[in-house]
Image (cartoon, rainbow, N blue to C red):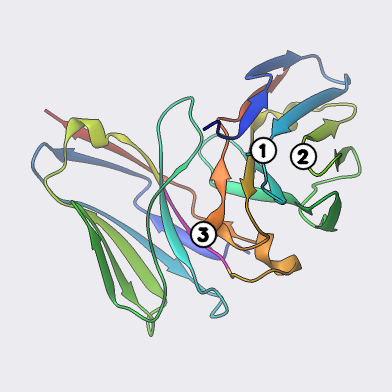
Amino acid sequence: QQQVKQSPQSLIVQKGGISIINCAYENTAFDYFPWYQQFPGKGPALLIAIRPDVSEKKEGRFTISFNKSAKQFSLHIMDSQPGDSATYFCAASRGGVDTNAGKSTFGDGTTLTVKP
Amino acid sequence: GAGVSQSPSNKVTEKGKDVELRCDPISGHTALYWYRQSLGQGLEFLIYFQGNSAPDKSGLPSDRFSAERTGGSVSTLTIQRTQQEDSAVYLCASSPRGSGLETQYFGPGTRLLVL
């Protein structure tokens, strides 16, 4: 059972456009929702993250929108640039210093291509 | 400062052989995680270490997979009698304390190809 569903699988956007990637989760115990950016041959790097007590978080050109009642969250990349071309993963985890802390779940990823 | 390092960066092996993958966490990080990333898939949790003990091994896909951590630092993931479906990128992450993703830093991964 996949606990986080991510869409679309791939996305092509023109330079300067807005890239939108969506994720839906099932487990209401999750309390931390990060987005990762991964370039080929590299490990995932944390891009931006949100907790369910806020509906939106913005860092530069990157914004997370969070809808707790719908159990959905999305990543918006404004003014998309060719350098943003990468694979983006959403994830959900439960914090805390216990055995469940490691049981994070990830979406399958979205390959973003920003055309010049 | 140095991040999480993994070795080898790439490994090609024949079906049935054993492989060992190494992870060097960030110095001082007590928690260490192993994940598997298959082609076109998200990350799959394998195992979590707090110090040298593994409170959660539930993600290991079969008894051919094992992991250990010594000295609260380096960890080794061993895959015995490798199968073609084991081909994937194996990622390690470390954290200054056992917690969720919020404090985890990922290494570059080991790309394993089983022929």
Is B115 in the magenta?
no
**Do tag 3 and tag 1 residues touch (Cβ < 8 Å)?**
no
Q: Residues within 10 Å of mark 2 (few under 14, many from 20)?
A: many
Image: A71 above or below A11: below
The region drawn magenta spans A89-93
**Disc 2, SS:** loop
Q: Residues within 10 Å of mark 1 (few under 14, many from 20)?
A: many
Q: Earlier in the sequence, mark 3 or mark 1?
A: 1
Residue identifier under label 3: B102
| Residue A91 falls left or right of residue A99 | left
**Disc 3, SS:** helix
Examine the image and state in which quarter residue B37 appears: top right
Spot occupied by residue A79 in the image (x, y as percentages of width and height): 11, 46
Q: Could you tell me how far apart the alpha carbons at marks 3 and 2 are, in whole angstroms?
A: 20 Å
**Disc 1, SS:** loop
Callout 2: chain: B
